[in-house]
Image (spheres, helix red, strand yellow):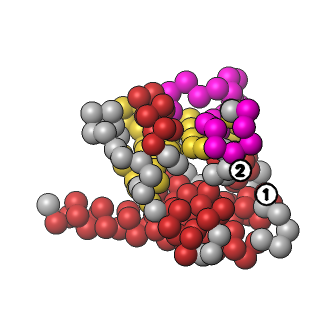
């Protein structure tokens, strides 16, 4: 993919902005893309609507705002309702499957990839890393960024002392994405 317009959305406190930062760094610092990021959040510290718009491209980016998302990462139902209608008809929807109920009429023709990121993070003992789980899943299902580039961006972005937990969260999300892709291939072959 030469160009991607990515929206990541959820509630404040879910790590939406950090997820955008990690994807942007993985693309621009640890790979050869250009990247921009715009963030938006409500006045409350936690619980309000929050989104990050990340554009990555092989050429310089003239306009930093996402106009038509090619990829939407929805961490909750409200984010899905707000941003799914503006997703490209051939886009990719990555969603927290325990928090988002998909409306087929809104996502007709869109590739769907759901993951229980919160549950995976809870299994790791810290729900706060659900965003890193989601970033790993994003990397696997889109194929846009390599695992190593994203792992480097995670290490460069997170607080010192949390590297082990965050890299395990990334690995679990990435593995969940690879597993889902393989199951979709198997299902397609069986048809």
Describe residue 141's horizontal placement relative to residue 22 as left or right.
Answer: left
The answer to whether mark 2 and mark 1 are in CB contact below 8 A is yes
Q: Which mark is residue 157?
A: 1
Q: How many marks?
A: 2
Return the residue at label 2. 18
The magenta stretch is 43-71
Which residue is located at x 16 percent, y 66 percent?
190
The residues tagged by marks 2 and 1 sit, at their Cα atoms, a distance apart of 8 Å
Residue at 78% x, 61% y: name it: 158
- State left or right for residue 114 relative to residue 55: left
Residue in the image at 68% along x and 23% along y: 63
Q: Residue at x 57, y 43 (%)?
A: 10
Q: Is residue 174 magenta?
A: no
Depicted 20 relative to depicted 109: above or below: below
Disc 2 secondary structure class: helix
Q: Answer with left or right where residue 73 lies relative to residue 103.
A: right
């Amino acid at each position: 993919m030469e160009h991607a317009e990515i929206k990541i959305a959820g509630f404040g406190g879910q790590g939406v902005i950090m997820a955008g930062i990690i994807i942007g760094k993985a693309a621009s610092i640890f790979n050869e893309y250009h990247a921009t990021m715009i963030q938006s959040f409500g006045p409350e510290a936690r619980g309000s609507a929050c989104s990050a718009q990340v554009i990555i491209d092989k050429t310089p980016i003239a306009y930093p705002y996402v106009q038509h998302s090619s990829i939407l990462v929805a961490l909750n139902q409200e984010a899905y309702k707000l941003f799914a209608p503006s997703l490209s008809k051939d886009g990719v929807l990555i969603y927290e499957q325990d928090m988002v109920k998909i409306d087929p009429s809104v996502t007709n023709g869109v590739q769907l990839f759901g993951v229980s990121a919160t549950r995976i993070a809870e299994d790791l003992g810290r729900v706060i890393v659900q965003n890193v789980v989601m970033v790993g899943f994003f990397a696997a299902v889109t194929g846009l960024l390599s695992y190593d580039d994203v792992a480097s961006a995670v290490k460069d972005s997170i607080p010192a002392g949390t590297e082990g937990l965050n890299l395990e969260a990334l690995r679990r999300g990435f593995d969940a994405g690879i597993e889902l892709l393989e199951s979709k291939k198997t299902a397609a072959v069986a048809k």
